[in-house]
Image: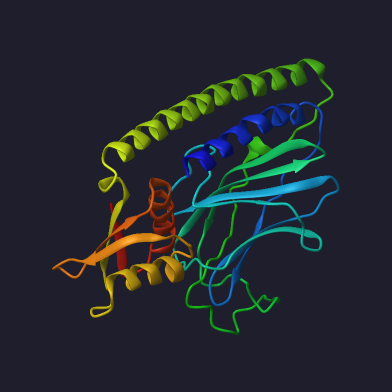
Amino acid sequence: MMQSKMFALLFILFNLWNVAFCCCGHEYTVPEPKFELLYPRGFSVKIPHSDGISIFAFHGKINERMDSLEAGYFSKDILNRTGDFWVFEDRRTNLRVGDKIYFWLFVIRNALGFRYDNGEFVVKDDTPYRIDGIQEESTSLPPPPSSTATDNDLTTEANKIVTTGDPITEAKRCGSALMNLTSALLQLRSEVNSLKDVNGILREISEKYPESARKLKIEGRLPANEDALATVKGIIEQKLLLSIEIAKAWRNKDGSITFETSNLDDKLRIIKAAKERLRYSKMYLTY
């Protein structure tokens, strides 16, 4: 997990310079995305295709603001468009009316990077949703029990590329953009170094205390009489959608189950998946 986050940060570092060039003379603005409910659960985010687009990336969180350009709970690069749109889809998340999706987008067009920052969408009960590919525009059918709606009026003006015929104004704008990017690059480099340090510490702990470094506990509404190991494996495969080998598991007096993974990386993968996919579950993970 540490390695993947470090790679994502380095990817952003590489592409931020493209954003600086796109600010200086290249006309493209990432359009306001359209959100759509998926029945019975999930949501999609799409933007129209424009000649030259090769990557569309969506990064977002639910009810938690994004920390600058972090990956978020939802983090995916879309490499192929669907018809005339670039589409991100999530078909697992259960959302409630009132939930808010914080997000940012990244588009690569003609080898240059463009961002849509500080996006916010609020879940409502009157938003169009899609059943088997059919777009429903009215509220004649009841909204799905787990739905997300978006109605964004907060298009970030800072993301719009403004052209001008005044070379002095243009130079000032580009210089300001480069200064902001330099600051962002330094911040990201610091975060990469910090992640390396944390990763090293975790490895040292894992080697010094191998059992505790791989141990987790699942609590909440669990099958009472089922074998502990079988219960854990079922939760990991069916709830967390992971394929991970569990070394051993045992049931505690309070009904919770403690288990051990084979290595630290597997433990981190389970923790990350549980934060996203057990959000509204009646079971929870402690570590």
Residue 199 percent coordinates (x, y)? 41, 35
Give the camera-side residue of 185 and 47. 185
Q: Position of residue 103 (x, y in %)?
A: 55, 49
Q: Does the rendering let one see residue 96? A: no
Foreground residue among 269 and 64: 269
Question: Which residue lies at the image location 44% right of the left edge and 52% below the top edge?
Answer: 269
Res 138 quadrant in image: bottom right
Asked whether, in this view, residue 42 is left or right of residue 201, the answer is right
Q: Please provide percent x and percent y for residue 151.
A: 58, 59
Q: Is 47 drawn above or below residue 11 in the view shown?
A: below
Residue furthest toward the left?
Answer: 253
**As displayed, is residue 73 above or below residue 231?**
above
Residue at the (53%, 51%) spot, across then down: 60
Res 25 → quadrant? top right
Closer to the camera, 124 or 246?
A: 246
Quick check: can you spot residue 271? Answer: yes
Residue 24 % position (x, y): 77, 26
Query: Which is more toward the observer, 17 or 31?
Result: 17
